Amino acid sequence: MSLAELRDLFIVIFALVGIGATILFSILLLLAFRKIRSILDSGRQTVGNVRNISSMVSDNIVKPLVSISSFLQGLRQALEFISRASKREEEKRSGQGE
């Protein structure tokens, strides 16, 4: 066997091995994609469920609590204002009585 024939034989062998490796890699990539796709779909569903739950909690619990808290804060400020105003009136009256 001459050097040229040996070279041609190695070229053919490496080409066949390269084609086989490419096919094997493509098959493995396709199988991995199928498994990953189902995992990603499951993750998307989970994220959607969490989003729905958090929006439901926000609508049914957080918003009413914020409304009540805002009302109570306003009521407290109004009572503080009235209290300060009545203290000023008492101070003015006590200052005039002397």
Image: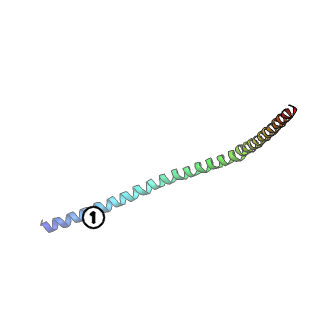
For image coordinates 36% across by 60% down, the residue present is 23
Q: Quadrant of residue 93?
A: top right
Q: Taking 26 as reference, is 67 above or below it? A: above
- Furthest residue toward left: 2
41 and 61: which is toward the camera: 61
Q: Position of residue 10 (x, y in %)?
A: 21, 63
Residue under the image location 24 percent in, 65 percent down = 12
Q: Nearer the viewer, residue 47 or 33?
A: 47
Q: Position of residue 98 (x, y in %)?
A: 85, 31
Q: Which residue is mark 1?
A: 15
In the picture, residue 87 is in which quadrant? top right
Please, is residue 91 above or below residue 19 in the view? above
Which residue is farthest front? 98
Answer above or below: position of 32 versus 73. Answer: below
User: Within 10 angstroms of label 1, few (less than 14), some, or many (20 or more) residues?
Assistant: few
Question: Which residue is depicted at the point 55% across and 50% down?
Answer: 43
Query: How did the renderer colour the structure?
Result: rainbow
Name above or below for residue 96 compared with residue 31: above
Task: Please state the horizontal and vertical placement of residue 94, each as a whole percent of the image.
Answer: 85, 32
For the N terminus, which image quadrant?
bottom left
* Quadrant housing residue 68: top right
